[in-house]
Amino acid sequence: MDQLNQLIIQRRKKADELAEMNVELYANDFKPTHHISEVLSSGSANEAVADLEDAPNVRASFKVAGRILALRKFGKASFLHIQDESGKIQVYVKKEVIGDEPYTQFKKWDIGDIVGFKGKLFKTKTGELTILADSIKLITKSLRPLPEKFHGLTDVEMRYRQRYVDLIVNPEVRETFRKRIEIIRLLREFLSNRGFLEVETPMMQAVPGGATAKPFKTHHKALDMDLYLRIAPELYLKRLLVGGFEKVFEINRNFRNEGLSTRHNPEFTMLEFYQAYATYEDLMDLTEEMLSWLTEEINGSMEVTYQGRAVDLSPPWKRYNIDEALIRVGGIDPGVLDDPEALIKLAKDKGIELEPMAGPGKAKTELFELLVEEKLINPTFITAYPTEVSPLARRNQANPQVTDRFELYITGREIANAFSELNDPVDQKNRFEKQIAERGDDEEIHPVLDEDYIRALEYGLPAAAGEGIGIDRLVMLLTDSPSIRDVIIFPHLKTEK
C-alpha cells in the first residue's frame, strides 16, 4: 500500500474516532468575527503583550476560522498555523485553557482540517503575533493530506488538474487570480467611465461567426436544430449598434475547437467593445491609454518584467503597417512585397503551407507571423492588413487591397485585434460568399452564410470601430505567467487516467 493510501486510512480512522466522541465532522455553526488580516492589523496587535501570563488580561477577543497549514503537537500544548483567504496566523492551544476533553479531540486534528478558534492576542518570545485559544471548533475534517506531506506539489499537470489544492498550498497562485479579478474589474471601470454599456450576447449560436475558427457543436432537441458555442460575440455586438446603442462591450467566454498550448485553451476570455462613429485609429489611442493605465494600476509602474525581459508600456507605442514591419523587423526585400508571385514563392521557400486558393495577402500575414511576430516585445501596433485575411474589416479608402485594421503585439504575442467595421451589406455578403467558396476542407470557415447579419446591415450599421482583447494573454503579461494555464483557474486537460 502506498504512503498516500496509508495516510488517508489514518485520517478516516481519526474521523471515525471523533464521530464516536460526538464531534460534528462537518459543522455549520461557527461564525468568524474577523478575517486574519484584520486581526493582524488591529489595534490589539499593536498592544499585544509579550508575556503569555498576561494574555488572559487582554480585553479584545477574536473568532477566526481557516485551514491548518502547520501543526506542532506537544503533551499539553500545541502551536499551529491557520490560513484564511486574507492571510495566516499562529494559534496556541493549551490543555489547561481549553479543557481536557476538547484537547483530546484537538489531538486528532490534522494539517488540512478547517477549524475555528476564539481567543486573545499575545506575542511569542520571537515576536510572532499569536492567538491564545480559549475555545476551539472542528469545522471540516480533511480526509486527504495536503500534497507536500507525501510528494510535494511539483507536478505541473497535477497543479492544473487539482487547482483547489494548488490554491491552498501556493499563495502566489492565489495572488495571480486575485490580480486577474482586479484586471477585469479595472477594464470594466475604464470602459464604463467612458460611456460604454456592458451587454450580454448569446453563447449558443445557430451560425458561428465573428472569427475564423472551428466551433464546438451541439444539438437542441426541442428546436431540433444544431447550435454552436460561440467563437466570438462580434456579429451580435454589431447588431446592437444597428439597434441604436453607440458604445457597448462584453467580457465574454469564447470557445474554439483547437489544440492546447501555452497560448491557447479551447475556452478563453475576451473583452470586445464597439463604438459608433469611431475609426480603428480612435481605438488605437483608446487602447494605448487603457492598457498603459491598467498596467500602472496593477503593478505601480508602466514597466513590467515578463519572463526575464523588460517591457515598457509607456505611451506612445510603435506603429508600423504590415509592410513596414516585414521590411524593418522581418528583413524582407521591399521589392518582394510588390510582387505577388515572388511573395507566395518566398512563403513556400520558408516552409509555409498555403491553401491552393491563397493569395499574396495570406502569404504576407503568414510571413509576418513567422519572421516578425516574436520580435515585437514592447507594445507595437501593426496596421493595413490585407483585405484577403480581414473579411469583416472596412477597406482602406486609398488602397482597397488593405483594410483599416490593427493588431497589437506585446512580448511577441497578439493581445488585441481591431478594425473600422465593414458596414456595406453588399460588400460584406460578397466577402462571406467568397470565403465560403474558397473554404475547401477548412473547418475553421463555417459553410453557412449568416443571412440575418446581412439583413441587419441592410437596416444600416453606423460607421463604427470594434476591438477584441485577449484577457488571458493580458493577465499572463501582467502576472509574469509563462502559460495560459497559469491564468485560467480551471484549464482544460485530457481526462485523468
Image (cartoon, rainbow, N blue to C red):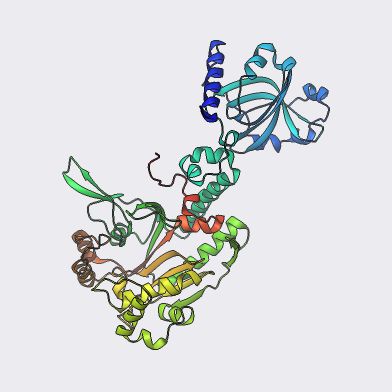
- Quarter of the figure with residue 224: top left
- Looking at the rendered structure, the number of numbered marks drawn on it comes to 0
Residue 450: image x %, image y %? Answer: 21, 60
Residue 22: image x %, image y %? Answer: 55, 11
Residue in the picture at 60% in, 27% down:
32
Residue 99 appears left or right of 213? right
Q: Quadrant of the C terminus?
A: top left
Q: Is residue 267 above or below residue 455?
A: above
305 or 277: nearer the eye?
A: 305
98 or 339: nearer the eye?
A: 339
327 or 427: nearer the eye?
A: 327
Q: Is residue 154 above or below residue 451?
A: above
Would residue 277 be seen by someone viewing this image from the given angle? no
Residue 64: image x %, image y %? Answer: 63, 28
Q: Is residue 407 above or below residue 63?
A: below
Residue 51 appears left or right of 298? right
Residue in the picture at 48% in, 66% down:
287
148 or 269: nearer the eye?
A: 148
- Quarter of the figure with residue 77: top right
Would residue 124 be seen by someone viewing this image from the given angle? yes
Q: Is residue 478 above or below residue 131?
A: below
Residue 238: image x %, image y %? Answer: 31, 61
Farthest left residue?
A: 224
Residue 314 appears left or right of 43? left
